[in-house]
Amino acid sequence: MRPVFTVLRKELRENLRDRRTFMSALLIGTVLMPLLVGLLVNLTVRRGQSQDNKPVSLAVVHGERAPGLLAQLRQYRIDVLTVDLDDAAARAAVRHQRPRLVLAIPDNYASQLAQGQPAPVLLYSDSSDVADASDVGRVRAVLGRVSSETARLRLMARGVDPTVLSAIAVQDVDVATPTSRSVLILGTLTYIILLTMLMGGLHVTLDATAGERERGSLESLLTVPVPREQLIYGKILAACVFMVLSLTLNVCAVALALRYVGLENLGMNVNLNLPVILKLILSCAPLAPLGASLMTIVAAYTRSYREAQTYVGLVLLIPTLPLIFANTLGLRPTLWLMMVPSLSQHFLVTGLLRGEPVGALYAGLSVSVSLLLGLAAAYAAGRLYHREALLG
Amino acid sequence: MIEARHLHKRFGAVTAVHDVSLSALDGRITGLLGPNGAGKSTTLRMLYTVLQPDGGDAFIDGISANGQSLEARRRMGVLPHGAGVYPHLTARENILYFGELHGLSGSDCSRRAAQLIELLEMADFADRHAKGFSQGQRLKTALARALVHDPRNILLDEPTNGLDVMAVRTLRALLLKLKAAGRCILFSSHVMQEVAVLCDDVVVIAGGRVVADGTPEELRARAGTADLEEAFIRFLEAAGRP
């Protein structure tokens, strides 16, 4: 097996001197991605904070008919501004989002209220406007509160205990721990971590296969007295080294970025200390041989570095597929799912980030199945390089 | 000593080599001469074991290129057509890499590399990255790489393609030196002058078949002309492939 390490050493040395490797393995993974993550999380945190505090603005038609109601709305931090619109104008205005919400007070409002009858109000909103949904909800909740408050007062005035109105008292019990709440954001982190890891080995793989053929050094290499599969194993191993290097740098950089962003604003306490970082790396690294081997296999069928780049780019999409299923179907770790590469890494990583790591059996299963598949793919790549069409 | 016996090779529906038998002896330079597409490269590739023949076999010092390809490769130094070098390694590192792959020990390897660098007059660029090398410098590097394990048999596929006069001259001198050291040298070319100047034996192939072989004198005599180029043309015409 000595030639495997000769090839490995040479590929490492050559690629460390290559600017393209530096870009794909080290720069993109460690600088750009954490910046992106930091920005993303920061924005989400800010948005989550601002939505609760921001006053809702509400345009009111014929506000003079309900001065009491307007005063109560203002108490609940709703900005009331008076406008003069008829029904058609109000509909048109809301459809064009200016203003987004219109409350109209009909002329019988005051008389109905005085008679103790339901007093009508019209709330114009556009339910297809998603950004608007929480504002409508807040206005409706405030109106409901005002309504029940008034009803309560009426009952008390007639000598009835207002509690008769509450037949059922619902109490919400939210079991979300502070950490699990932010997992949605962190779920995308798995994808970014795996993607940058694979990208770390991308250039090395392409250069060692399609690139070597394009430069015309492959044929010379095949005349040395070393079985072809050993040459390929050396190259795959080199790609793995770069992937793990990229993964390590990337996880550390992401951890730093998350620390800086301050996730405690989301009520999250991910403690990204050294053991957790190590476990994150150990969870993802077993996917490297499979990724490198698959890229090598794809590169074997292409004629040039550029062509290989196109197709190997598609390989990078493969690990995203299980992640999409995981997110849309809300998958939970099971014995079988822990055998799916990339999905099992997703479970391991989210588990670690939640502070609820999956069991040792599951972790072991993920590591061993991914590694076994990687070995099988490496073997297949080795067989493939016995093809004569390889020389082009 | 290199021996080919009834080599045959197909690529899909196209037969590149129909039937090629030849032998290249130790201490002699043998030229494989033929027009473009005659099957020179395919024949050489079968000899240096990167292609497997569909029929026939080749023997390197009596070792089957087909059955014991690793053992056969140990005895060959190969310069493939348009051989490239690793751009981010220096010329010396390129040579050392192949030395290691041939199983040379570290000290043997560096001694041999130093020897070749001197022999091929590479000293002024030996420790520069190969990225900016001229074609001549690249060829010297690739050649030194092919010779790092001091092989008894040397195969070169169109080695002078795209080289200037000085580089061709260096190559020629090297081949003569190797010949004097008793090595077996087989190289392909479509350039008549080169073959005429250098070769002890010539094998003319056309359409995947050997159409003539012998020393340049024998070929001239057989074709009934004093000019080797004219002889070459006559053989091709006789084979029905001008």
Image (cartoon, grey):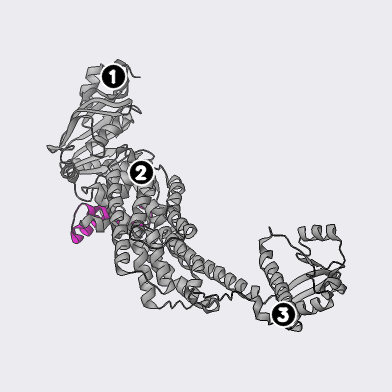
User: Which residue corresponds to mark 2?
Assistant: B166
Kindly report the secondary structure that dominates the magenta region of the rendered protein: helix
User: Which of A265/B64 is in front?
Assistant: A265
Tell me the amino acid under the disc marked 1.
Phe
Most extreme residue toward the left is B62
- Quick one: quadrant of the C terminus of chain A? top left
CA gap between label 3 and label 2 equals: 107 Å
Q: Nearer the viewer, mark 1 or mark 2?
A: 1
CA gap between label 1 and label 3 equals: 116 Å
Q: Which residues are magenta?
A: B85-114
User: Which residue corresponds to mark 1?
Assistant: B235
User: Which of A183/B30 is in front?
Assistant: A183
CA gap between label 1 and label 2 equals: 31 Å
Q: Residue at x 20, y 61 (%)?
A: B106
User: Which of A4/A284 is in front?
Assistant: A284
User: Which residue corresponds to mark 3?
Assistant: A152
